[in-house]
């Protein structure tokens, strides 16, 4: 069903249909979104009826009382069944009696003065199939349902069939959905493309030549699964998984606002990488981040995890009102919890009752109350007294890193990180009129969203630890669904619920609700095991499909919502950088540690700074720090890394669970001119020139390292021709070969001190090296290079 959008409406003050028709003439029953024929299965309010009401009726007959017409509300059963106030003796819906239901009469009428939606609303009349859905639903008693996302997931029986395509349970659900759309899955991708996809998805790095050769030569039945297990066991898996969680947690290396000075939250990032690599169960992963400091006998690791909630912006500007900013920090925590963990737009209830979801303003401030008891201050002084962490602070000593916190990559004797910490006395929380910090009204008690799940105080105390336990309770209908959907999105580019941050009334419906629920239940039943979930996904036939898109599939499934083909999408910004560094051999694979400042255009920071603090000017790093993974690039909130921003990286100023994907000329210009790309091309060319092989072999090796497959004969010939053209230009001195090679700080070959077993570096032809560098730069600029197919 696409996005549920509210438009203008129906049911104005008109009575009697002068052109009543037999609604049976409208046409045949359609297929329901749940995948069953309406002729044989009950119509679902959530998946069949509500989307139509939302599109056509809710603006005037929905939750928003300020815009409601005719005193009619169609999103609530009691109101929809009640007598119409403006039409005596009539009812919008009479359960079991379509012929008496004014709603059906109006949507099926052709009289422009009576028909709904009205012609002047420009929404278009309901289709015959939609009208038949309403008729059948009313005939079945017009049952309303609780919103699908607020109903605990149920493990549906696995669809059965005779197809040999499925490899695990995921595939049976996907295949059943495909068949109902009149689609069939693709064949499995070839080994080269499949390995590239797998390595990028599990580690964020392309496969090495050794891995490519090993997999290509492994003809055992479990060759692919062996690759999966090996990649899941590498430390790069944790780095890859951490990138998404950095977006959720709005991780940055500065405080934001005008002065935007430096802070040291990176030890928490090291913990996240460690947690994913150790396969910490998701319920524990969340519990520690929400309330690790409140666990009995809390360890420093558990307290460090709570830095999750302290990653938001902080002001260091003089003259501010401390309470205003303290409340702003609470609002950020509440928004991050709602969007990142529950997949809900709770922030909409900050100033008034939520217009679409069943959250009142009181519900919002009851949720905010869980975070209101921290020792955090709204203001600790201006930038002249800036510290790398704000109260409350966790101090990590060298002795901790040598013992219990070995995963932290630090050479400092002590580190300070902003973490959570409770006051000794309870701070009262009030509902704030219109969300203003200085307008408290009614007092509220800490409580989670009751429309999602009851907050039973006999099980869950009224503090963050209680909230954490409520969040990961097996009865909570959202937590597992939301996480499974986010993980799914990481592999397929689109969640089963497209609106990954909004599972509420205005969010998208799941394209395969049975699969989503099955995965959510399965995750909980198997100890919230994240690696197991990931392995299930990548072992599925669904994931292994070729990305080939036929005209029929593009027409029936343009967004690949039903997974009729393999995923095809551009790499995230961090992994484009990682691919370039890794394929050229200059990637520094050190795990964790402080963020680094690679090459950046001059003057970018200086153009957007107050001129105060240690980040007033950009001081580029050198040596190994220039070649770290994109995950470790320094994030200054007021000036995020510009090249990463071109490729749609999150700017980290708020919680994000899904990145956009754009195509702009700046992206092509970045790949052509970015010094990191040019330097990588130069270093790889120089390394290949040192190998005792001919040009054809060098070109093929470069092609394999970058595109992760062997070139076709035609590709090899065209690349060779380009190489010869560039070589001729350099040999005729039309282009300065040495100037071409003089880029980047990575040591030139003559600076190497290690003895060579082949031709000495300085004997390599400058012209041939420069020509090969141009070839490699061209390969980096191919669309296939930065695309997962």
Image (cartoon, rainbow, N blue to C red):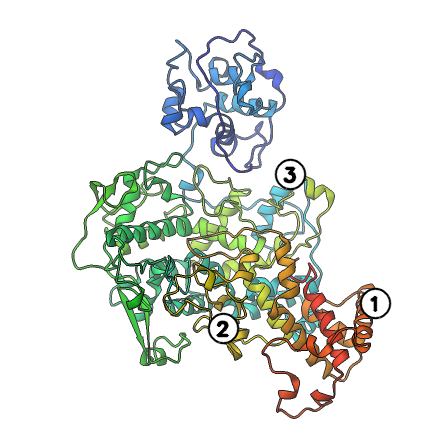
**Up-down relation of residue 21 to residue 34 (above or below):** above
In front: label 1 or label 3: 1
Q: Where is residue 151 in the image (x, y as percent from the top left)?
A: 41, 40
Residue drawn at x 55%, y 19% as measured from the top left: 119
Residue 193 disc label: none
Give the quarter of the figure containing the N terminus. Answer: top right
Local crowd at mark 1 within 10 Å, few (<14), some, or many (≥20)?
few
Element assignment for label 2:
loop
Q: Do the residues labelled 2 and 1 touch (CB within 8 Å)?
A: no
- Give the residue number, with chain letter if any, for mark 3: 181
Q: How far apart are marks 1 and 3 (CA)?
A: 43 Å
Q: Which of marks 2 and 1 is nearer the N terminus?
A: 2
How much space separates mark 2 and mark 3, taking CA atoms? 53 Å
In the displayed structure image, the side of residue 19 where residue 479 appears, left or right:
left
Q: As rendered, which of 717 and 44 lies closer to the eye?
A: 717
- Picture quadrant where residue 307 is located: bottom left
Q: What element carries label 3?
A: loop
Q: Do the residues labelled 1 and 3 touch (CB within 8 Å)?
A: no
Q: Which residue occupies 61% across, 43% down?
A: 176
Q: Position of residue 757 (x, y in %)?
A: 70, 91
Q: Which residue shows up at 54% across the image and 6% down it? A: 18
Pointer 2: what residue? 620
Badge 1 element: helix
For residue 717, which numbered disc appears in the image? Answer: 1
Answer with mark 1 or mark 3, whichever residue precedes in sequence.
3
């Amino acid at each position: 069903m696409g996005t549920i959008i509210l438009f203008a409406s129906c049911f104005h003050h008109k009575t009697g249909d002068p052109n009543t028709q037999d609604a049976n003439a409208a046409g045949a029953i359609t297929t329901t979104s749940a995948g069953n024929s309406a002729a044989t299965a009950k119509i679902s309010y959530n998946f069949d009826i509500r989307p139509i009401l939302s599109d056509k009726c809710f603006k005037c007959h929905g939750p928003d009382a300020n815009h409601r017409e005719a005193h009619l509300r169609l999103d609530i059963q009691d109101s929809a069944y009640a007598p119409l106030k403006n039409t005596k003796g009539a009812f919008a819906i009479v359960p079991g009696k379509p012929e008496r239901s004014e709603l059906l009469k109006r949507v099926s009428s052709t009289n422009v003065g009576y028909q709904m939606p009205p012609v002047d609303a420009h929404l278009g009349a309901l289709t015959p199939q939609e009208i038949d859905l309403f008729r059948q639903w009313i005939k079945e008693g017009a049952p309303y349902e609780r919103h699908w996302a607020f109903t605990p997931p149920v493990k549906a029986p696995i669809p059965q069939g005779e197809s040999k395509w499925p490899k695990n349970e995921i595939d049976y659900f996907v295949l059943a959905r495909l068949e109902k759309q009149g689609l069939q899955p693709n064949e499995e991708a070839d080994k080269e493309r499949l390995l590239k996809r797998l390595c990028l998805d599990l580690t964020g790095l392309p496969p090495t030549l050794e891995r490519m050769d090993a997999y290509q030569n492994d003809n055992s039945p479990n060759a692919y699964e062996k690759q999966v297990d090996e990649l899941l066991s590498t430390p790069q898996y944790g780095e890859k998984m951490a990138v998404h969680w950095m977006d959720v947690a709005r991780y940055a290396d500065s405080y934001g606002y005008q002065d935007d000075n430096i802070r040291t939250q990176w030890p928490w990032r090291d913990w996240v990488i460690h947690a994913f690599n150790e396969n910490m169960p998701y319920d524990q992963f969340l519990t520690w981040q929400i309330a690790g400091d409140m666990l009995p006998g809390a360890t420093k690791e558990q307290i460090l995890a709570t830095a999750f909630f302290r990653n938001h912006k902080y002001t260091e500007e003089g003259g501010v009102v401390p309470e205003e900013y303290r409340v702003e920090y609470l609002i950020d925590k509440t928004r991050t919890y709602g969007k990142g963990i529950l997949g809900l737009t709770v922030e909409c209830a900050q100033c008034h009752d939520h217009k679409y979801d069943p959250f009142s303003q009181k519900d919002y401030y009851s949720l905010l109350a869980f975070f209101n008891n921290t020792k955090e201050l709204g203001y600790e002084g201006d930038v002249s007294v800036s510290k790398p962490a704000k109260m409350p602070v966790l101090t990590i000593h060298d002795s901790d890193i040598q013992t219990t916190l070995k995963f932290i990559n630090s050479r400092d004797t002590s580190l300070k990180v902003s973490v959570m910490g409770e006051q000794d006395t309870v701070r009262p929380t009030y509902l704030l009129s219109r969300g203003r910090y200085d307008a408290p009204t009614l007092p509220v008690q800490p409580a989670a969203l009751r429309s999602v799940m009851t907050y039973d105080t006999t099980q869950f105390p009224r503090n963050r630890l209680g909230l954490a336990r409520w969040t990961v309770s097996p009865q909570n209908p959202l937590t597992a669904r939301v996480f499974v959907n986010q993980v799914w999105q990481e592999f397929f580019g689109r969640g089963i619920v497209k609106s990954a941050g909004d599972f509420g009334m205005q969010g998208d419906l799941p394209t395969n609700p049975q699969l989503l629920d099955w995965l959510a239940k399965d995750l909980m039943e198997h100890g919230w095991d994240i690696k197991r979930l990931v392995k299930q996904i990548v072992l599925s036939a669904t994931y292994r499909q070729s990305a080939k898109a036929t005209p029929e599939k593009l027409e029936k499934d343009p967004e690949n919502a039903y997974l009729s083909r393999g995923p095809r999408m551009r790499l995230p910004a961090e992994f484009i950088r990682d691919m370039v560094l890794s394929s050229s051999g200059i990637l520094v694979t050190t795990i964790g540690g402080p963020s680094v400042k690679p090459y950046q255009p001059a003057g970018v920071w200086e153009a957007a700074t107050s001129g105060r603090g240690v980040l007033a000017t950009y001081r580029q790093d050198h040596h190994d720090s220039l070649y770290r993974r994109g995950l470790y690039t320094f994030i200054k909130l007021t000036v995020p890394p510009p090249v990463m921003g071109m490729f749609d990286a999150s700017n980290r100023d708020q919680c994000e669970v899904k990145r956009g994907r754009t195509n702009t000329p700046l992206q092509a210009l970045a790949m052509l001119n970015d010094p990191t790309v040019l330097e990588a091309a130069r270093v790889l060319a120089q390394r290949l020139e040192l190998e005792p092989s001919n040009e054809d072999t060098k070109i093929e090796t470069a092609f394999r390292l970058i595109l992760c497959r062997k070139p076709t004969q035609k590709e090899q010939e065209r690349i060779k021709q380009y190489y010869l053209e560039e070589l001729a230009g350099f040999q005729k001195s039309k282009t300065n070969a040495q100037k071409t090679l003089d880029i980047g700080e990575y040591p030139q070959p003559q600076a190497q001190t290690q003895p060579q077993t082949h031709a000495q570096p300085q004997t390599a032809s400058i012209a041939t090296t420069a020509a090969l560098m141009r070839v490699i730069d061209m390969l980096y600029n191919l669309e296939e290079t930065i695309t997962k197919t």
